[in-house]
Image (cartoon, rainbow, N blue to C red):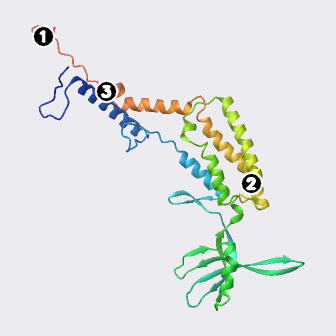
């Protein structure tokens, strides 16, 4: 049995096995640092492994906003998503005691050859200026309670309200589609190996199944107007094209190759590859006939 040797402080294992283990740890630390510098963050809970972060969460986030009908807006901080809105003309009614404002939309409704005036409460604003949109299902009930309050009219005003017609799906529809799509837009998909024929088979099967699912459930999922139904084909194509682009990244294992290539190049640079090693200039000694050291 070989006795292990330790340094005088008793802190570092100086045996051949200990030295080899330490060398491996140093190499692993260098490789991990190189990969982290290349954009592949290390999981703090698993220090011995390097995890690759492929941005599937951002792709899924964009898809979810698309299904909700959200629109892209821009400000000083860049782009952001916002619920679809529209400007409508409303009658402003104010409660003199609480200073709460009620924005009421007046519509004409045809009924048995005659026209009736219909009022819909679309927005409420408190005394501090905070606003809240009112759902159609709650409007009638709130207006009935307001009949007992002596409201004061402040005239007409255009306000921005949520545009439900631009939202192709309800919450149930968005949740069901996201549940399906999230099984395809994954890191496993990016890091897989597919050929052209297999990708076409997958997209063909998914296209048929997705079309059948939407056709059987589109009304339940919120497509309850002609305008929303007109988006049916466009939505199917957008979803399929986005998923196909994810599979194309795995064509011939390209995503794996890209990650490994980037990892290898960064590893060499992080460990001080030959391109980074400074070369000391060679200084030639002046020859002298009386100094043998210069011969």
The residue that label 3 is drawn on is: 277
Q: Is residue 110 left or right of residue 135?
A: right
Disc 2 element: helix
Numbered disc 1: secondary structure: helix
Q: Are marks 2 and 1 in contact (CB under 8 Å)?
A: no
Does residue 212 appear to the left or right of 253 in the view shown? right
Can you say whether 2 is above or below 115 in the image? above
Tag of residue 217:
2
Question: Residue at 72% of width from left, 38% of height from top?
Answer: 205
Distance Cα–Cα, label 3 vs label 1 = 30 Å
Could you tell me if residue 154 is visible in this image? Answer: no
Q: Position of residue 81 (x, y in %)?
A: 58, 58
Whether 257 is drawn above or below 64: the answer is above
Compute the Cα span from label 3 to label 2. Answer: 65 Å
Please tell me which of labels 3 and 2 falls first in the chain.
Answer: 2
Q: Quadrant of residue 294?
A: top left
Q: Is residue 52 visible?
A: yes
Q: Residues within 10 Å of mark 1 (few under 14, many from 20)?
A: few
Q: Residue at x 56, y 86 (%)?
A: 99
**Image quarter in which the N terminus is found:** top left
Up the image or down, 152 lies above or below 185; here it is below
Q: Please tell me the numbered disc located at residue 49.
A: none
In depth, the one of 140 and 109 nearer the eye is 140
Q: Which mark sits nearer the N-terminus, 3 or 1?
A: 3
Q: Secondary structure at mark 3?
A: loop
Q: Which residue is mark 1?
A: 293
Q: Earlier in the sequence, mark 2 or mark 1?
A: 2
Mark 3 closeness class: few <14, some 14–19, many ≥20 residues within 10 Å: few
């Amino acid at each position: 049995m070989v006795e292990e040797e330790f340094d005088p402080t008793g802190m570092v294992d100086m045996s051949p096995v200990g030295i080899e283990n330490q060398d491996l740890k140093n190499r692993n630390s260098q490789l991990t640092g190189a990969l982290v510098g290349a954009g592949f963050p290390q999981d703090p809970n698993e220090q011995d492994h390097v995890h690759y972060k492929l941005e599937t969460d951002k792709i899924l986030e964009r898809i979810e906003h698309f299904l909700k009908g959200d629109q892209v807006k821009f400000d000083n901080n860049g782009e952001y998503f916002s619920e679809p809105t529209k400007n409508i003309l409303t009658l402003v009614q104010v409660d003199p005691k609480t200073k709460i404002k009620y924005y009421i939309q007046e519509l004409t409704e045809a009924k048995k050859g005659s026209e009736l005036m219909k009022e819909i409460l679309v927005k409420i604003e408190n005394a501090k200026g905070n606003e809240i949109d009112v759902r159609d299902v709650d409007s009638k009930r709130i207006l009935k309670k307001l009949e007992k309050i002596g409201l004061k009219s402040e005239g007409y005003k255009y306000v921005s309200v949520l545009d439900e017609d631009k939202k192709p799906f309800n919450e149930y529809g968005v949740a069901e589609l996201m549940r399906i799509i999230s099984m395809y837009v994954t890191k496993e998909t990016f890091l897989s190996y597919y050929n052209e024929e297999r990708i076409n088979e997958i997209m063909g099967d998914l296209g048929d199944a997705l079309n059948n699912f939407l056709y059987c459930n589109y009304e339940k999922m919120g497509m309850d107007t002609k305008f929303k139904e007109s988006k049916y084909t466009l939505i199917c194509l957008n979803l399929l094209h986005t998923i196909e682009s994810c599979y194309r990244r795995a064509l011939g294992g390209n995503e794996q190759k890209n990650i490994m290539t980037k990892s290898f190049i960064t590893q060499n640079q992080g460990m001080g590859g030959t391109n980074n090693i400074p070369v000391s200039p060679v200084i030639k000694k002046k020859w002298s006939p009386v100094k043998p050291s210069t011969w």
